[in-house]
Each structure stands twice: as C-alpha cells, then as structure tokens.
C-alpha cells in the first residue's frame, strides 16, 4: 500500500464495514488469517487469537 494512504483509517473503515455486513447476514463467527506482525491491529479491533503458527514461504533459486 502506498504510504500516502496509510494511517488514515481506510483499512479500519473497510474492516468494520465488512464485519457489519457479515453480522447483518447472520454470520456468527468471523475468522481471518493474518501474519503475526499485525496481530495487535486485530486485537485492538475486537478479534481474539484462535491459534498461532509461524508461516514461512520458501523458494529455491538456481544459481
């Protein structure tokens, strides 16, 4: 994301709108997948951890 759009509340507004729409449709549980580095962001917005794991991506490069 471009720096000029960060920390303006756009992502949080989109998250809350998505949550509202899901709740209005009768969805009782909302799960999301996030990297550990941004876990605090979701904690502050009412999400609680279900479990933790370390995600890793690997690539093999032919040198």
Image (cartoon, rainbow, N blue to C red):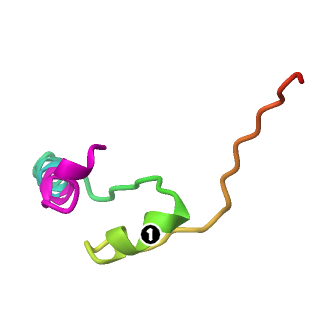
Up-down relation of residue 8 to residue 47 (above or below): above
> Residue 43: x percent and y percent?
35, 75
Q: Secondary structure at mark 1?
A: helix
Left or right of 9 in this view: 55: right
Region in magenta: 1-15
> Residue 11: x percent and y percent?
21, 53
> Residue 15: x percent and y percent?
21, 54
Visible residue check, residue 26: no
Quadrant for residue 12, please give it.
bottom left
Quadrant for residue 7, please give it.
bottom left
Q: Residue at x 10, y 51 (%)?
A: 24
Instruction: Give whichever of 5, 9 is nearer the camera.
Output: 5
Q: Is residue 19 magenta?
A: no
Q: Residue at x 22, y 55 (%)?
A: 6
Residue position marked by numbered label 1 in the rendering: 39
In which quadrant will I find the N terminus?
top left
Left or right of 37 in this view: 27: left
């Amino acid at each position: 994301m471009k720096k000029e759009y960060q920390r303006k509340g756009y992502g949080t507004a989109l998250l809350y709108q998505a949550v509202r729409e899901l709740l209005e449709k009768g969805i009782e549980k909302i799960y999301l997948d996030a990297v550990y580095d941004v876990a605090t962001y979701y904690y502050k917005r009412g999400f609680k951890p279900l479990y933790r794991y370390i995600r890793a991506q690997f690539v093999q490069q032919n040198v």
